[in-house]
Amino acid sequence: MKSAQTRTVIENVRPEINAGAHAAKRVAGQRFQVTADIVADGHDVLNAHIKYRFGKAKKWQYAPMHEVGNDEWAGEFIAEKQGKYTYTIEAWVDYPLTWQHNIERKIQDGQHVNVELLDGIRFLEAAAKACKAEAAYLNELKAAFENEESYKYAIDEATSDRLHDIFNDNPSKQFATTYDRELPLEVDREKALYSTWYEFFPRSAAKNPGEHGTFKDCLDIIPYVAEMGFDTIYFPPIHPIGTDFRKGKNNTTTTVEGDVGVPWAIGNKEGGHKDILPELGSFDDFKAVVAEAKKHGIEIALDFALQCSPDHPYVKENPSWFKWRPDGTVQYAENPPKKYQDIYPIYFESEDWENMWEEFVSIVLHWNKLGIKIFRVDNPHTKPYGFWEYLIAEVKKKDNDVLFLAEAFTRPKVMQRLAKVGFTQSYTYYTWRNNKAELIEYMTELTKGEMKDYFRPNFWPNTPDINPWMLQGGNENLYIVRHMMAATLSSNYGMYGPVYEQIANDAYVGKEEYLNSEKYEVRHWDWTKTNKLKQLITRINHIRKQHSALQFTNNIEFCNIENEHILAYFKRSEDGSSNMLFVVNLDPYNKQGGWVQVPRHLMGIENGTPMRMNDLVTGNSYIWRDEWNYVELDPFQVPYHIFSIDY
Amino acid sequence: MKSAQTRTVIENVRPEINAGAHAAKRVAGQRFQVTADIVADGHDVLNAHIKYRFGKAKKWQYAPMHEVGNDEWAGEFIAEKQGKYTYTIEAWVDYPLTWQHNIERKIQDGQHVNVELLDGIRFLEAAAKACKAEAAYLNELKAAFENEESYKYAIDEATSDRLHDIFNDNPSKQFATTYDRELPLEVDREKALYSTWYEFFPRSAAKNPGEHGTFKDCLDIIPYVAEMGFDTIYFPPIHPIGTDFRKGKNNTTTTVEGDVGVPWAIGNKEGGHKDILPELGSFDDFKAVVAEAKKHGIEIALDFALQCSPDHPYVKENPSWFKWRPDGTVQYAENPPKKYQDIYPIYFESEDWENMWEEFVSIVLHWNKLGIKIFRVDNPHTKPYGFWEYLIAEVKKKDNDVLFLAEAFTRPKVMQRLAKVGFTQSYTYYTWRNNKAELIEYMTELTKGEMKDYFRPNFWPNTPDINPWMLQGGNENLYIVRHMMAATLSSNYGMYGPVYEQIANDAYVGKEEYLNSEKYEVRHWDWTKTNKLKQLITRINHIRKQHSALQFTNNIEFCNIENEHILAYFKRSEDGSSNMLFVVNLDPYNKQGGWVQVPRHLMGIENGTPMRMNDLVTGNSYIWRDEWNYVELDPFQVPYHIFSIDY
């Protein structure tokens, strides 16, 4: 029989993901707010705090909670360290504060409270034990409470802030309730939340047309990418490419001499997932790329694609990791009736799954030892969730800096599940969210619902797999806008270049694919080319570095503006130091204008108080005194305002 | 390390109340639908069922689930028996069905599938073991799959419905996942969901003015209540009433000779919670009332008010159950600065709480032995939740028919919590929800969110404590409408009479209280009085009995009608046999009209198909062929339509 003496109830704790089976996510130094519904019977004063601890620490730390209305309580702490925190909530009927609250109301009503004073002595005694610094004062009070002659002093002190603070700071926690579950919080390094990705094919990095690019060639591309302000370069798979059933240019099933194959068809007699395609260079060359990137403040991210070419060494070494057909052949990938004979999927139902899992973990650790701490995982939704949960946890045990980006463009609940089991970041539907209503709805889903606590979006306007319908016919203005929104709606974003900045948008007719895609062939690019788009990309990446409001995603608040072609939003950094307003014209052909409502209340600024709006792209600045302000945007000038706000 | 071979994930199971800490509620014979998000990696065919069992049964029963879209699955079973069920979900990648799905697509594509047929033999073999009745067929198929000569027969049968059904009905459940938690479902008797309450004060039942009514007098009132169609009579407390600090008429703190006191000030030297006020009669008289009520299909509900008068026997017998002040007096009830010196609250922090809890359980069981199976609990929100959880469970162990109505008019989360810990029904804010928007919003909160599964509303237009502002100035039309909505929005409703049907709405000036309230004095009523209101109450109570759509609350669907004074709603019984439309004019003074949209899709009727609309009050009937139909309601005729729909 549970004690009747415990009267407080804690429920509806947020964040709480699948009853605590999965962790909420933050980055080091980020604020972590916890809310809960807390009630007791009757009308007594309640109190509560968050209990939390880091890693294997035994000692709890405490963060105060307060009621925010309708029996909902909130508190917060700073998730200072990278690693795992545990948190829960403790709540109690606060008898000393209840006593003080009641005696105050009686005194105000003119009642004589001598009996109530005597009743309060037990709280003074308990507080004196808990708080040595105030023991003398409390003993003095006790004497006054007992003595009718010092009644005036007694009631003044009984209702004082000093006594309130003593009670509040030294809670008795008599008959306290602790929430049913201890919940996990995973704290990553800052890059988990704020990262700027540039993807390119190393094999297209050659100086001369017709040559196969090498890591050495990449050394010359790195400054180009750094100059544009990116902090992460992601390479498609760099491993030996299968020769059996190799695909030709534009995804043909037959090849001609010189066809280089698809980097995602991994493995041939020269090696597998732990090896480098000889045409790209040596391990030393690779290390040189990692080192050169580091000099420029850039991390190299690798692709982790768990599938094999028919000539991958695994097929011979570990035949039980593949599904064998009754005719003695290995089952190739298929999505009936479609066949992908150049790819053998992993057979995760294999009875040898434990060795297989260990081997796959060892692939990641192999590259991690070479300095790689970011992995873009190819099609994670075609491998078991339990496998990912294990792999990510194992890798993080060795190096807690490692980040995983889930490339799952699939159904919402599958994408959510991957984020829950541990993926640090996730590709999103941004690529196909074009109009104002779609963008607001999608951002709201990502940043205001349960997903905000475990799913970190990474926005990409294009990828080697996706040449979006909209961009296929788009002018430079549209590319400028699609980039700007990716980079300002989401603190994590990336683009696939130089296709993007060079607007190399020729499409394979009737498909959302690029013509002459680098997936199937070596391309040659003029890396010296420049244009307005590239300049604005560069400018925005630098703004992202300087203005911390852009280093968060969930801080977005959309602003009213009565024009369906204009999207306006506000962002504020957690510390309040960076406040920004974004206004973007979604129409790439026509000038659009409208009155935008600035959420002054979020900055605590009265109407009438001037705000200086600094346009960080044009260098213009304006004084806005009102809540509603007129803006007009010509897509052929700059189709957006990015304002930092001073007040 | 969890097996990689288990690929299915089950989450977001609904209902699931506080991660399974509290039970979902249904009544015997009611449908119980369970939904969940179920995903696996890849594109294989999934399958799932609800696993459930009754009471202590070891053997699970199964109910199939199917996908309803966006990876949400649903299934249902009938909660046939009164008592506790346990349910969870099991899901698996269905390898045989995946095989069938894939081979079908390949055959349609014209591929030769001899290898796939061979691959399917293992599924035939497993199915033959699981399903003896089809073993011969399956062996025949196996032979055909192995023999190129019977290829045509093999592919016809491989894709047949027969084979599909064999696979589906004999699931292999290889590598199945079971949901993390087993969840509770509490099934009550039908009255938990459908009840019709009439409250009156037995002491006001005397035939002659000036006399104190008795249980014997009540015998003559029972037919009156039965005639009106109520199935539950609820008596305010029937126990000895305290004399210390007794309240006078209209809640004065001084009494005059003959003042009878407040029934909720329980206990004096003649007895306490297990005794009867001598003026009402004897235990035999009480039993006669219970028996007479039963003859009329009526149950007697008693009040359970856990508080004591200063002269209650408990105060002497169990002084530790009360809080003692430093001056040697017992702490009376207070809500500072207000004092209620006629009431001693129970001190639930008492160290003797275990004996106290047992005693309180024994009070309920005492009356239960006298045939009482319904308790209206006074102010449950001022006693600990854990206590109620214990008491309700203990009582139900002895008699699972017992129902508890929570009289907690307080904050939403407190009311929700009481329902979660076991209260069968709850008073609501209906009493103060007057206009169309308020009513729709409140009903939506009760019937479409999480509350629908554990919180059963009981709608009261008035109580002895509440003479609502709106009714104080209302005409008979308003009383007719407020009753009609209570009785048709909610399957549980009650009213406090004869105050209500006699429109005895004199108010204590400036308060939401009755003047000369029966709480403080004996009143005398003319029980022969009749009026239009009483006739319509009677009619509606009989309609509720005949039309099962009115015996559910969560089945409500509001209908569009472009008039803010007209509320329209549709209800359909779970078996689909009873379909009803309600249209009510909320304006008690003016005729109102508008076009109401009938949700034909919920009945599966095409536009154009005639529906016969039977007005169950006037006896008129209409043929409606369209989706939108015009109605006009004159409050001085009948201010509403209650239609049963035939089609």
Image (tube, coloured by chain):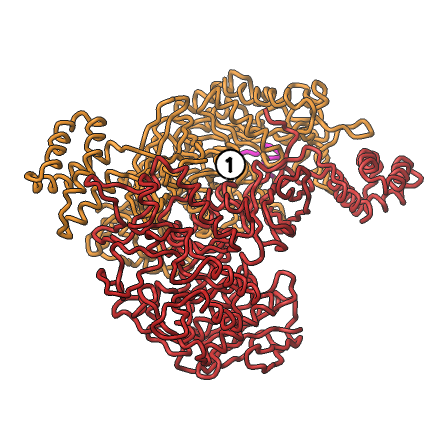
Chain colours: A red, B orange
Left/right of residue A441 with respect to residue B65 in the rendered view: right
Q: Residue at x 60, y 76 (%)?
A: A626
Magenta stretch in the rendered image: B517-524
Q: Position of residue A327 (x, y in %)?
A: 19, 41
Left/right of residue B638 with respect to residue B149 in the rendered view: right
Helix, strand or loop status at disc 1: helix
User: Would residue A271 be visible to someone looking at this image?
Assistant: yes
Question: Where on the picture, by quarter, is residue A107?
Answer: top right
- For the residue pair A243 and B384, the one nearer the viewer reads as A243
Q: Position of residue A541 (x, y in %)?
A: 53, 70
What quarter of the picture does the C terminus of chain A occupy? bottom right
Left/right of residue A344 with respect to residue A539 in the rendered view: left
User: Would residue A592 be visible to someone looking at this image?
Assistant: no
Q: Mark 1: give few (<14), some (14-19) or many (20+) Cα within 10 Å.
A: many
- Residue B490 within the magenta-colored segment of the rendering: no
Please name the amino acid that badge 1 sits on.
Answer: Ala
- For the residue pair B336 and A89, the one nearer the viewer reads as A89
Q: Which residue is mark 1?
A: B419
Q: Magenta stretch: dominant SS?
A: loop
- For the residue pair B26 and B312, the one nearer the viewer reads as B26
Furthest toward the top, the residue is: B284
Q: Position of residue B154 (x, y in %)?
A: 11, 39
- Residue B523 within the magenta-colored segment of the rendering: yes
Q: Position of residue B15 (x, y in %)?
A: 42, 39
